[in-house]
Image (spheres, helix red, strand yellow):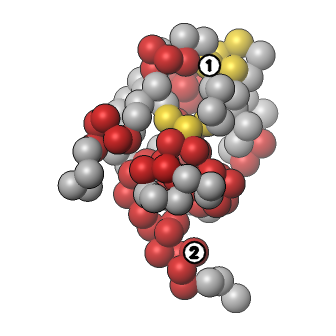
């Protein structure tokens, strides 16, 4: 049985993730912090895992706090997450985004508090 609070949180995660622009990435923790749940980065990861059949949610643009593609095993194919990011001009070496700070999208800076 799914917890309704989790469903509500997941919907908020998806709403934020949908705002991540092409060629940019954010972290699980940045989304959690933006949603007022700073210690819920893992829950954001679970939400991203559940976004596999939601093409409107760019789950490939959400990575860990140092730019590692920790969720890549949830994408079909061995390198699909990396390929999707590289198609957007993001260089990935050894499962880590290069120039992470340059590509990082911070929901607080980009969306403000009126989201």
What residue do we see at 65% from left, 83% from top?
A: 2
Give the percent coordinates (x, y) of residue 100: 55, 18
The residue located at (54%, 26%) in the rendering is 85
The residue nearer to you, when weighing 73 against 27, is: 27
Foreground label between 1 and 2:
2
Q: Quadrant of the C terminus?
A: bottom left
- Give residue 114's position: percent from left, percent from top: 21, 55
Q: Which mark is drawn over residue 6?
A: 2
Identify residue for label 1. Answer: 97
The image position of residue 98, as x and y in percent, is 60, 12
For numbered disc 1, what is the local secondary structure?
Answer: strand
Dot 2: few (<14), some (14–19), or many (≥20) neighbours within 10 Å?
few
Q: Is residue 1 above or below residue 33?
A: below
Up the image or down, 31 lies above or below 15; here it is above
Q: Quadrant of the N terminus?
A: bottom right
At x 62%, y 57%, the residue is 40
What's the CA distance linking mark 1 and mark 2? 29 Å
From the viewer's perspective, tell me whether residue 85 is left or right of residue 41. Answer: left
């Amino acid at each position: 049985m799914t917890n309704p609070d989790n469903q509500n949180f997941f919907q908020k995660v998806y709403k934020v993730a949908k705002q991540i622009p092409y060629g940019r990435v954010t972290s699980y923790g940045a989304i959690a912090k933006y949603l007022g749940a700073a210690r819920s980065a893992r829950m954001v990861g679970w939400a991203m895992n559940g976004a596999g059949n939601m093409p409107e949610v760019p789950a490939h643009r959400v990575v860990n706090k140092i730019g590692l593609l920790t969720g890549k095993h949830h994408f079909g194919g061995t390198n699909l997450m990396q390929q999707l990011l590289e198609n957007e001009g993001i260089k990935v070496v050894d499962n880590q985004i290069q120039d992470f700070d340059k590509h990082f999208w911070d929901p607080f800076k980009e969306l403000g508090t009126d989201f």
